[in-house]
Every structure is written in C-alpha cells, then in structure tokens.
Image (cartoon, rainbow, N blue to C red):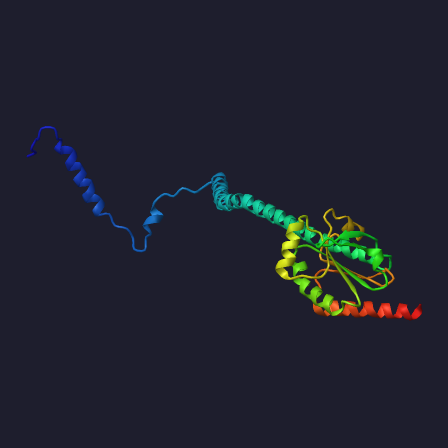
C-alpha cells in the first residue's frame, strides 16, 4: 500500500531505486577497461592545428613578458649611463684645461730658451728696492745672473735661499740681479725684510723687462756671459746642485773668452 505525502510522488522515487539496484548488478568481463567502454572524441586536423597555434602564441607571450622587465631595466639605465659619460667628458676637459694652463707657459719657455740662447741679452734699466738704478749694458765685464720671480710663487720662494748663498759666495765674480714681477712694491719690500734678502731686487712693475726676456712662467733664470751673451736659461726652481753647475759653466765660458781675447 503506497502512502501519499502531499507534494511528493512516491512512484517516481520507486523507479529511481529500481534503476540503481539494476545498475549495481551489472557485471563486466574480467580485464575490461572501463575507460574503453566510454565514447571518446577524436580531434580533427583543424583542431590540432588550432591547438598548436595556441601553444605557440602562449610561448611567444611568455617570452615577451620575460623580455619586458629587462627592456625596462635597460631603458632605466640608459639615462644614468649617458649622464655618467657626460660627467666623465666634462671632467676630462677640465683636467686638460688645467694641465694646459699649468704647462703651456713652461712649453713656451722651452721654445724661447732655444731661440734666445746665444743672443745678446736685451738691455734694460730698473730700480732696486733701495732706489739705485741698474742698467744691464753697464754690467759687462762680469757674468750676470738674472732671476725672474714673485712673492706669490712657491717655486720662486723655494729657490731664494740658494740664490742668496750663491750671491755671497760669488760676490766679487758674478753680478746677481733678481727681478720681481709683483704688482705691489710694498709687498716685495716686506717680503725681503722678513726673509733677510740682501741681494739686489729690481721691481718690474709694468712687466716690460719680463717681456724683453720673453718670460711666460716663473721662476726663470738667465745666465749671461761677461760679454753680454745669454748662454744658459733655466726654467723652474733651482736646486743648489743645479745652480752650482750653471755657475761653474758660466765661469768656464768667461775664462775661455778671456783667454781668446
């Protein structure tokens, strides 16, 4: 006897139970592969080509995505590299400019040295710090050493002690003249007093004498024979050994010229 419940058909439920019971009692031969009993769809040639094309597109997308970060990194590095190169070029030009400013006068001095040596020393008249006039042409008969310097030049100041010692040692044999290219006479006088310098210091305020001797950088020392000919020209600071050597050569030239006469 079937019981009726409002809203539910018991007939349908009975059928479902019978169907499940029948399925449980279905038997298959041993070794049967259940997957083989199910129908399988075989892909067509078009489907295979579409699948391969899709795989290729996916791989291309992966490669492109992998390259994007490196490209972005390189794009970020490019301005930095350009900036570093620019800074390096500017620094290099500044260094070359500084070196040029420093060594150009010395290079010109070497050129002038080769041109002036062997020529007659230009004549000039300058006044010493104590008011005495000195004329170059009136000093012939003795060798002359003319040193161009300035109080603000470290190399010049460094060699003054050697010049002072040589001045006292060869006082009766060689004339020593030091030409200051400073622009302030009081500065030179104070400097000479503080250092105890007693050799003749000439003040070349307008730079005319320096121009006559083509002085482009200091210190420069010109060695002039007793006959008024420039025989040596030294560029840069003089050491004791170099100064002694120059003076010996100057004396030898003077002695040889005296023997000839």
- Camera-side residue of 160 and 154: 160
Find the residue positioned furthest to the right: 261
- Camera-side residue of 130 and 97: 130
In the image, residue 222 lies at what x, y percent?
78, 60
Find the residue positioned furthest to the front: 131
Task: Tell me the quarter of the image containing the N terminus.
Answer: top left
Residue located 72% across and 48% down the image: 205
- Could one spot residue 214 in this view of the protein? no
Picture layout, residue 44 above or below residue 175? above
- Camera-side residue of 146 and 5: 146
Count the marks.
Answer: 0
Picture layout, residue 141 above or below residue 151? below
Picture layout, residue 19 above or below residue 32? above
- Camera-side residue of 110 and 254: 254
Residue located 56% across and 44% down the image: 78
In the image, residue 75 lies at what x, y percent?
53, 43
Query: In the drawing, does residue 55 fall left or right of residue 23?
Result: right
Residue located 61% across and 59% down the image: 194
Task: Tell me the quarter of the image containing the C terminus.
Answer: bottom right
In the image, residue 62 lies at what x, y percent?
47, 45
Query: In the drawing, does residue 13 fall left or right of residue 44?
Result: left
In the image, residue 10 lies at what x, y percent?
12, 33
- Could one spot residue 54 in this view of the protein? yes
């Amino acid at each position: 006897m079937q019981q009726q419940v409002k809203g539910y058909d018991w007939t349908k439920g009975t059928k479902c139970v019978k169907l499940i019971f029948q399925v449980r009692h279905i038997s298959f031969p041993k070794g049967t592969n259940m997957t083989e009993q199910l129908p399988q769809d075989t892909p067509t040639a078009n489907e295979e080509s579409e699948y391969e094309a899709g795989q290729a597109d996916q791989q291309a997308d992966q490669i492109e995505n992998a390259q994007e970060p490196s490209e972005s990194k390189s794009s970020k590095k490019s301005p930095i590299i350009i900036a570093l190169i620019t800074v390096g070029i500017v620094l290099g030009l500044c260094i070359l400019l500084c070196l040029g400013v420093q060594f150009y006068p010395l290079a010109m001095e070497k050129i002038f040295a080769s041109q002036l040596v062997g020529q007659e020393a230009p004549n000039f008249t300058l006044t010493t710090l104590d008011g005495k006039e000195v004329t170059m042409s009136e000093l012939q008969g003795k060798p002359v050493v003319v040193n161009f310097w300035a109080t603000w030049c470290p190399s010049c100041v460094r060699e003054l002690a050697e010049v002072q010692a040589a001045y006292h040692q060869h006082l009766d044999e060689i004339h020593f003249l030091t030409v200051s290219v400073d622009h302030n006479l009081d500065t030179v006088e104070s400097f000479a007093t503080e250092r105890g310098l007693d050799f003749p210091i000439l003040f070349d305020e307008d730079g005319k004498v320096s121009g006559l001797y083509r002085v482009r950088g200091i210190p420069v020392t010109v060695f002039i024979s007793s006959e008024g000919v420039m025989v040596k020209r030294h560029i840069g600071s003089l050491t004791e050994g170099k100064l002694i050597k120059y003076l010996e050569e100057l004396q030898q030239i003077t002695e040889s010229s005296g023997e000839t006469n």
